[in-house]
Amino acid sequence: MQDLVYTTDWLSDSTVFKVNTIDPHSDHHYYRNEAELKQHASSFVQSLNGNWKVSYVKDSNLRARDFYKQGFNESGFDSVKVPGHLELQGFGKPQYVNTQYPWDGSEFLRPDSIPQNHNAVASYIRHFTVNEGLKNKRTFISFKGASTAIYVWLNGHFIGYSEDSFTPDEFEITDFLQDGDNKLAVELWKFSSANWIEDQDFWRLSGLFRDVELFAIPSTHIKDINATATLTDDYAKGKLEIKLDVVGDDLSKKTARLTVYDLDEKPLLTQEIALGDSCSAFSAENLDVKFWSAEHPNLYSAKIQVFDGDDLLEVIPLDLGFRKFELKNGLMLLNGKRIIFKGVNRHEFDCRNGRSVTEEDMLWDIMFLKQHNINAVRTSHYPNQSRWYELCDQYGIYLIDETNLESHGSWQKLGECEPSWNIPENKEEWLDNCLFRADNMFQRDKNHASILIWSCGNESYAGTDIEAMADFFRKHDQNRIVHYEGVTWNREFDRITDIESRMYAKPDDIETYLKSNPEKPYISCEYMHAMGNSIGGMQLYTALEKYPQYQGGFIWDYIDQGILNSTEDGEEYLAYGGDFDDRPTDYEFCGDGIVLADRTVSPKASTVKDLYSNIKLRLENGKLTLRNDNLFAETDEYSFILKVLADGRKVWESKPLEFAVAPGEEKTFAPDWGKVSEEGELVYEVSCLTKKDLPWAKAGFEICKAQEVVKSADLSLKTSQKKLTAVEGDFNIGVVGDDFSILLSKDKASLVSYQKNGKELIKRAPQLNFWRALTDNDRGAGSDFRFSQWEVAGKYAKKQDVDVKREENSITVTYTFRLALSSDVKCSVSYTIDANGKIIVCAKYPGTNGLAPLPEFGLEFALPKAMNQFAWYGLGPDESYLDRTAGACLGLFESNAEKNKAPYLMPQETGNHMGTRNLRIYSEQGSGILLKAIDKPFEFSVLPVNTMELDAAKHHYELPQTHFTWVKILAAQMGVGGDDSWGAPVHDEFLLPSENEYEVKFSIEAL
């Protein structure tokens, strides 16, 4: 065979994106015989994963141009792991940008031009010997993921060229293989014209980051399968059609046998066909099958055997999920039922390996999704590894499969729509490239039951090129629908998408659409921007489920894209944009996950779990209202446990109960709550649990719970009647008891000492606080500017008066302050001390018109560092905020100061707990303080750093060494928001208006 002639001109030519690649095909596995099938080890496949040789240069002009030739001296090459990213192995540096192109400000470029000054090239070499199972067969090489453009040689012969980073690049290499050693050479370029339409919001990482393997095919081979397992129009029976694309010689003598097994692994269907034509098919109707859904992911095992007479040539396993997804009367229906997507957007990411994720990572993700009631994923914004789709089929996750297409930076600049040079738009030179990407994804993924929707890509404006992609999907697949959000920016192309899909639309705007008698159902393909401390107000979106055409949304996003890095001192931390001196960059905007980059579950996840639950529980006057929002699952698949709590302690528990509610129905029950005589605050609680072991959870796993306070806590003030002896000096007021002493300073205007058995408990005096460490949402909404007056209001408050009031049993010292505001606003803090050493603290803000809302109001003070343990009776176990209480329950919890500081990618407000009745802060030796709410519960945080330290740090390693335990006791704190992180304020109902009065009152006692 004559060698192809290659040129680097292809890199900057959008019309050249494949040279000598084979056609895309389904991602089915195939084996030589039944024994291999059982072992899941095909002798037709040879992995080339492992250590490769590499020469990396930042300047393409310095690349080793002859490295692919036989006899080339490779001794100077380094070693690199495949699969893996170059930048995460010391070759180049990671760069994070969102919308802007990575070369912006460095070189002025327009499509199809590529960077000339810093286009890195990696020259890979891998030597291998062909395994016995591949010899004397047509053989191919598959690069499952390569970013961004690759040239391939084998034994000095040029094989081909390919782009599209997230679907396989495959070439036939039969004619160039040789006995013994084979030299594979890959020249990988970081930048090509493909980067113009691979402008996703992610780290710009390059390399052979997915598996590389050889595969051979038998003399007769099914190269492509199109399996359609659907339902009859009345949803009563299954229908099956399996189209085969066969290659081989003399097909007239070859046959194929299909066997489908039922869920008990007994044969359900057997068919045999002659392969006299390269296009053959199996078909069957009226099959008695159980349908596939996320609730019941019923997969039917099948296999196709190819024979030459009695000789088995290959065997192919298939998983068939029978389901019918359709758009009907303005609704998306699954098996005839209106579906609601309770979804997340998911980047493939790991803090050590970037987008080169492992099966272990994927399984962890699947378990998390199922355990948090998440039923859907949008593969933002590219096709994922094939294994991910197999797992979603098996465990039950609905998918929007998204084409590797995003040109965000070509039409949106600094947040404004400016499409003067947008691509692909209506440009003929980009059309085939777009269709190539759609075809690659469709052909590979088409047999996966989990995929319900094809997406034409992300944030690429709109035009005839993307319209052609939509037409392609519709032509080739009548059993799924087409999604594309970009038409919201250009309604001329509204027909591209079958559903109204928007990003970050506000609840009121969505409701307006839903009330307009729309033609299309609605989803938010991105909503609830989960950057840092976020997800506030999510309940405003899930409340829209009452509208039939609201069919859910996909939180942005699943996992933080933080990369493990080290400081100069060797301290490991999770890095964000700019930490590798990468410029331009979008800094911490990569930290948007409900899961942290190291797969630590964030406190936000409990809210998602609660609001996404298909089982809705509500207690009112002891009656249980249960709504079953499952489409197919009966409530007999769950058990329910009733509990009665007294001051957070369980005092009664029922046996496992059943409450029968059909899917889509709601019923109210009057359960028996037992006979309880305990004093204190009484709470009824009901939990919904899994009844049996499931692939993703053990029996007894909690799906959701609900509570009702049936007898409120007594938070009235209780003080000692013993006679008090106090000393009022010129500078201080002191109280001394048998084992305690308390000192209030007239000069410092605060409680300055509280000693128990001679040991000081107060390290930094309580100070008025109106400010919180800014969250990512605060910064994005401009709250730093809007609320800035409150940062100094308490910190620099001026003492105006000290009033001392003596009574026989107590002494009260009230400090009046003028706040450091432009208005004349006064606050007071009073301390009342009784003879037992109990201190009653009351901080009051009177309310003032004309000021910005308060971030928070209360007191902040420091305890000894050793007093870093705490236990509380209030809402928990995770942090809670005014707009994020879903998932929090009333109970007894414990933690410590360090654990209470959520490791958001950038330090910010964290660790707040609402509804607190009492709080105990103590050391391991037992010394500490007890704080009890008076009149109404308070909010609190216990942290190893204070507000200003959190606010000043950009990374956790920048936080100072812990010297104290910092405590905040608050009347209230505003919500955290989450509609977006670049302008959306916290909703008004979750703000603290300045004209309102705020008061926090609590007692302090030494332990």
Image (cartoon, grey):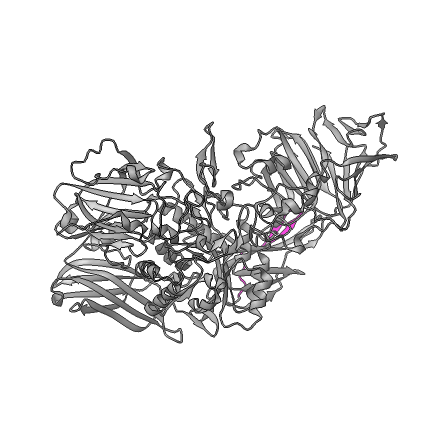
Position in image of residue 153 (x %, y %): 21, 45
Front residue of 646/177: it is: 177
481 and 659: which is toward the camera: 481
> 316 and 505: which one is in front?
505
Count the marks: 0
Please indicate whether residue 821 sits to the left or right of residue 188 in the image. Answer: right
- Give the farthest residue toward the bottom: 234
Q: Quadrant of the C terminus?
A: top right
Give the residues drawn in magenta, as a range. Answer: 643-660
Report whether 788 appears left or right of 808: left
Residue 2: x %, y % from top left: 13, 51
Name the residue furthest front.
108
Position of residue 501 measured from the top left corner of the image (x, y, whole percent): 48, 63
Q: Quadrant of residue 401?
A: bottom left
- Seen in the image, is 14 located left or right of residue 521? left
Instruction: Check if residue 654 falls in the magenta segment.
Output: yes
Is 647 within the magenta? yes
